[in-house]
């Protein structure tokens, strides 16, 4: 069975982009099921998507995490926004650099998708 790997770049603080990305990932999982690994890399202005306090997408994000979607927040983004890893929705991991993660995973054969 063929497996697929999709890395999704999220740099926006726009809730419309967040909603669209959540729907797109749902469609991807519905079509490819367990044959696809999905990793969201959050950096730039995407901090509101990751923070637990007041996050209207918290339920959707938890559902994605429960479907084995990996969500990674850039440490540089956290520092720039004065946030700590404990401010994130539980299950979101912290990576050193979002842009570096994208480059590394694309070199490893992951398909790149820009959120939105």
Image: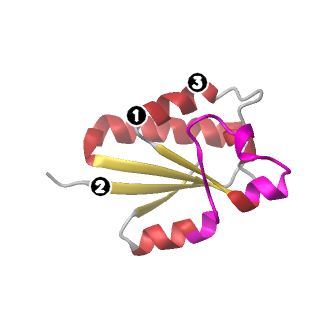
Work out whether residue 30 or residue 60 is closer to the camera in this orientation and state it: 60
Which residue is depicted at the point 46% across and 57% down? 7
If you read the primary sequence from the N terminus, does the residue marked by circle 2 or circle 3 appear first? 2
Residue 36, x across and y down, in percent: 31, 48
Q: Would you say residue 96 sits in the magenta stretch?
A: yes
**Does residue 80 lie above or below 65 as drawn?**
below
Q: Residue at x 45, y 41 (%)?
A: 25
Q: Is residue 93 magenta?
A: yes
Secondary structure of the residue carrying tag 2 is strand
Q: How many marks?
A: 3
Its colouring scheme is secondary structure
With respect to residue 57, does 85 lie above or below? below
Q: Would residue 44 be seen by someone viewing this image from the given angle?
A: no
Helix, strand or loop status at disc 1: loop
Is the residue marked by circle 2 packed among few (<14), some (14-19), or many (20+) residues within 10 Å?
A: some
The residue beneath circle 3 is 59
Q: Would residue 48 be seen by someone viewing this image from the given angle? A: yes
Q: Which residues are magenta?
A: 77-100
Specify whether 59 is left or right of 86.
left
Q: Are marks 1 and 3 in contact (CB under 8 Å)?
A: no
> Disc 1 vs disc 2: which is toward the camera?
1
The residue depicted at 37 percent of the width and 42 percent of the height is 28
Residue located beneath label 2 in the image = 4
Between discs 1 and 2, the one toward the N terminus = 2
Residue 21 position (above or below residue 97)? above
Asked if the residue under mark 3 is in contact with the one under mark 2, i.e. CB atoms within 8 Å, the reply is no
What's the distance in space between the residues labelled 1 and 2, CA to CA?
Answer: 15 Å
Q: Which residue is mark 1?
A: 67
Q: Residue at x 40, y 39 (%)?
A: 68
How far across and how far down the image is residue 110, in percent?
39, 64
Residue 99 has which mark?
none
Q: Earlier in the sequence, mark 1 or mark 3?
A: 3
């Amino acid at each position: 069975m063929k497996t697929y790997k999709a890395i999704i770049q999220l740099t926006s603080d726009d809730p419309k982009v967040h909603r669209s990305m959540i729907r797109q990932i749902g469609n991807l999982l519905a079509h490819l099921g367990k044959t696809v690994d999905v990793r969201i890399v959050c950096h730039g202005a995407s901090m509101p998507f990751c923070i637990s306090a007041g996050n209207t997408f918290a339920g959707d994000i938890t559902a994605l995490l429960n479907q084995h979607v990996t969500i990674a927040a850039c440490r540089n983004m956290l520092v720039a926004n004065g946030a700590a890893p404990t401010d994130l929705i539980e299950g979101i991991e912290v990576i050193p650099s979002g842009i570096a993660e994208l480059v590394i995973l694309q070199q490893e054969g992951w398909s790149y998708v820009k959120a939105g």
